[in-house]
Image: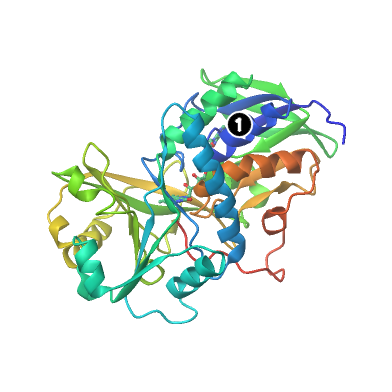
Amino acid sequence: MQRECLDVLVVGAGAFGAVSALDLAQRGHHVTILDRTTGPHPSASSTDISKMIRMDYGSDVFYHDLADHSLNIWEQWNEEWPKRLYHPEHFLVLAAAPFEPGSFEFESERVLRERGYTPERFNAAQLAAKWPAWNASLYPQGYLSPRGGWAESGAVVSRLLESGRSEGVQFVQGQLDEVLSKGSQVSGVRYRERGGSMNTLTADRVVVAAGAWTPILLPWLEDTLKPIAQPIIHYGVENPYRWQSPIFPPFAADTAGSGWYGFPSLQDGRLKLGHHGNGRVVDPDSRGEVSKEHLDHARSFLRSSLPELANAPVVGTRVCLYCDTFDGDLWIGEDPGRSGLIVAAGGSGHGFKFTPMIGRIVGDVLEKRDNRWLYRFDWRERGEPRKEAARLQI
Ligand SMILES: Cc1cc2nc3c(=O)[nH]c(=O)nc-3n(C[C@H](O)[C@H](O)[C@H](O)COP(=O)(O)OP(=O)(O)OC[C@H]3O[C@@H](n4cnc5c(N)ncnc54)[C@H](O)[C@@H]3O)c2cc1C
């Protein structure tokens, strides 16, 4: 297929926007990114110290496979980039009860084995011997996932933006106000400049990758995409080496039941604890603070599961926003009612790990090429008979 060189405007410089801009520039399109800052925005979901990179998705082989493909590129980026930002330190999966068919842990392990991986199954005694920080009496069974780990997510976005710059991506600082159209064809955007005045940018295609802000900017998606607040806590540990892999790998502790997951300590002693719960729908620009109730809840988790951290001081908190779709699948496709408007959002609390594949998917949508992953992400109606959706976030 002959490739037409298009003027593409990408709105949002989080992981989805940065990698889409890079892919599109590498395909030869003229790409501009519009965001409120030229680097990672402090309140963007991607701008955190770490995100989990895992293939464990219960029985949902689609996501296992997509993560497997993404991991190939994470590993390639580690070779190509000046600094390794993906840390292949495995993923420790702890279960609060012996594995049962149908549970997240059982099904994830089964899919790993069926697809040729060898997870390391352990019981409580083996957990205590190998990963002694854990109160093994609470976790009778678990496995160490052999491929996965975590990525320095904010740094990854900076790196992708830098790579985009060297491929010719232009940056405009400002805030999208409205997507403009001529008839049913998108023609550009109106945006507010830093100084407050309005300006316009013309484009053949507009890719809106504004994470949790997407349904605010494109209000016809407000029933489809929801900004959901989820808490993150950073604790300070005195001896970071004691809290790093291999003795303290990234973990999910009965996460389908309890919601807890976390990461090894950074060199500076920050150890991140996340919790996947129901969350609350918020305005992305006034999301509030992590509540005292949640801090207390987290403290009792530490006391019971990781007793050495029972008194670890809180050194930071963050309310991070999922951009949840109604079915947990990402949302990547062209708006059927607005030709040339592509949406790349709906990370639903688990999108970061797929960053390496997102650009390719968005590029194929924009160029109207087939893409094997798209059938789960494309524009869809609530209540449509769906394939299995992601059951566990992070
Ligand atoms: C608590 C939490 C934990 C998570 N943990 C994991 C994990 O461990 N593993 C994993 O794979 N995923 C995880 N995720 C999900 C992951 O963070 C997201 O799927 C991913 O970062 C989404 O990237 P994005 O580019 O879509 O959005 P964002 O990173 O939020 O980027 C959106 C961008 O749009 C810009 N923008 C907004 N409004 C405008 C406007 N008007 N004009 C211009 N620009 C605008 C913003 O400034 C921002 O830069 C987690 C999410 C949360 C909240």
Image point 71% across, 34% down: which residue? Answer: 206
Q: Is residue 311 left or right of residue 134?
A: left
Q: Is residue 49 above or below residue 296?
A: above
**Between 65 and 327, which is closer to the camera in this rendering?**
65
Q: Position of residue 394 (x, y in %)?
A: 44, 56
Q: Position of residue 371 (x, y in %)?
A: 74, 49
**Between 75 and 19, which is closer to the camera in this rendering?**
75
Q: Which colour scheme appears in the figure?
A: rainbow
Can residue 287 be seen by looking at this rendering?
Answer: no
Q: Is residue 195 left or right of residue 121?
A: right
**Between 239 and 158, which is closer to the camera in this rendering?**
239
Q: Position of residue 384 (x, y in %)?
A: 72, 68
Q: Is residue 63 above or below residue 44?
A: below
Q: Is residue 319 left or right of residue 298?
A: right
Image point 78% across, 29% down: which residue? Answer: 204
The amino acid on which the numbered mark 1 sits, given as a three-letter code, is Leu
Image point 66% across, 34% down: which residue? Answer: 178
Give the labeled residue for mark 1.
176
Within-10-Å neighbours for mark 1: few <14, some 14–19, many 20+: many
Q: Position of residue 209 (x, y in %)?
A: 60, 40
Helix, strand or loop at mark 1: strand
Q: Is residue 142 above or below residue 62?
A: below
Q: Is mark 1 within 8 Å of ligand 1?
A: yes
Image point 25% across, 68% down: which residue? Answer: 127
Q: Is residue 335 left or right of residue 247?
A: right
Can residue 273 be seen by looking at this rendering?
Answer: yes
Quadrant into which the N terminus falls:
top right
Image quarter for residue 121? bottom left
